[in-house]
Amino acid sequence: MNGSSEALVKLENQELDETFRPVILPAVLSKNSLLALYSRRWHNRQELLKLTMAQLRDAGIDPQYAYEEGRKPFWRE
C-alpha cells in the first residue's frame, strides 16, 4: 500500500469509529457512579495479580491475600 491508501484506510476507520461510537450519559461516567466503581475494582485487581513476589513483599502484601483479592469479581467488595 502506498501512503495515500493507508491514510484513506485510517480516515475511513476513524469515521466508522465516530459513527458507531455509543453515546454514554455523563452520569454513567462520573467518578462516583457504580460503573466507575466496578471499573476501578476490576483494573486494580488485574494490576494486583500482575505484581511479582518481590513487589508484593516490598509493598507488605501477603501473596495469598493478593491472589484472593485479585480473583474476586468486580461486583464484590
Image (tube, rainbow, N blue to C red):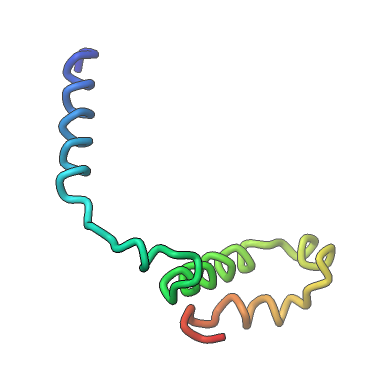
Whether residue 23 sits left or right of residue 30 in the image: it is left
**Residue 24 on image: x %, y %:** 28, 61
Total number of numbered discs in the rendering: 0
Image: 50 above or below 6:
below
Whether residue 58 sits left or right of residue 7 in the image: it is right
Residue under the image location 19 percent in, 17 percent down: 1
Whether residue 55 sits left or right of residue 39 in the image: it is right
Most foreground residue, 70 or 18? 18
For this orientation, the residue located farthest to the front is 27
**Residue 28 on image: x %, y %:** 36, 68
Most foreground residue, 24 or 73? 24
Residue under the image location 22 percent in, 35 percent down: 14
Most foreground residue, 13 or 71? 13
Whether residue 55 sits left or right of residue 17 in the image: it is right
Residue under the image location 68 percent in, 76 percent down: 66
* Quarter holding residue 6: top left
**Residue 58 on image: x %, y %:** 84, 63
**Residue 22 on image: x %, y %:** 22, 57
Q: Quadrant of the C terminus?
A: bottom right
Residue under the image location 19 percent in, 14 percent down: 4
